[in-house]
Image: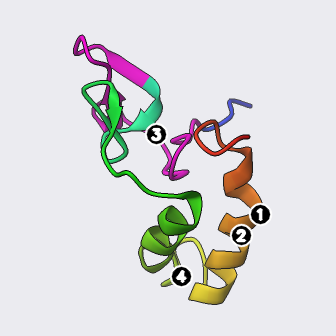
């Protein structure tokens, strides 16, 4: 089974080519989504905690999480494994 690619900043599923970010030379960057990475740089200068708080409302209405508390807990556990946030 093929593993789904996720943005290594916000964990958005990267299911379409047009959803991936771009490098400085305009080529596609398969690690990040277009909302997080554009023209070779991160779009928002934020901490991991700020990214989680930004994402909570987007994923907590039943898709995929049932509520904000569940979404926040899941992201706090998962985001440290993403490329952007690994120490």
Q: CA distance from mark 4 to mark 1?
A: 19 Å
Q: Nearer the viewer, mark 4 or mark 1?
A: 1
Mark 3 secondary-structure assignment: loop
Quadrant of res 84:
top right
Q: CA distance from mark 1 to mark 3?
A: 20 Å
- Where residue 20 appears, as percent x and y from the top left, is 36, 33
| Whether residue 67 is visible | no
**Which residue lies at the image location 66% right of the left edge and 65% below the top edge?**
75
> Magenta residues, as a range?
5-29
Mark 2 secondary-structure assignment: helix
**Which residue lies at the image location 45% right of the left edge and 35% below the top edge?**
32
Give the mark, 2 or 4, whose residue is nearer the N terminus.
Answer: 4
Give the mark, 1 or 3, whose residue is nearer the N terminus.
Answer: 3
- Which label belongs to residue 74? 2
- Which label belongs to residue 62? 4
Mark 4 secondary-structure assignment: loop
Q: Tell me whether the residue at label 1 lies in contact with that at label 2, contact meaning CB atoms closer than 8 angstroms.
A: yes
- Which label belongs to residue 6? none
Residue at the spot of label 1: 77
Residue at the spot of label 3: 14
Q: Is residue 72 magenta?
A: no
Give the mark, 3 or 4, whose residue is nearer the N terminus.
Answer: 3
Eyeballing the image, is 35 above or below 16? below
């Amino acid at each position: 089974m093929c593993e789904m690619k996720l943005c290594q900043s916000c964990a958005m599923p990267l299911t379409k080519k047009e959803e991936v970010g771009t490098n400085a030379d305009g080529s596609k960057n398969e690690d990040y989504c277009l909302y997080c990475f554009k023209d070779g740089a991160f779009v928002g200068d934020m901490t991991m905690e700020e990214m989680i708080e930004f994402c909570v409302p987007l994923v907590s209405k039943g898709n995929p999480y049932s509520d904000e508390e569940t979404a926040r807990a899941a992201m706090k556990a998962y985001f440290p494994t993403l490329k952007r946030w690994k120490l």
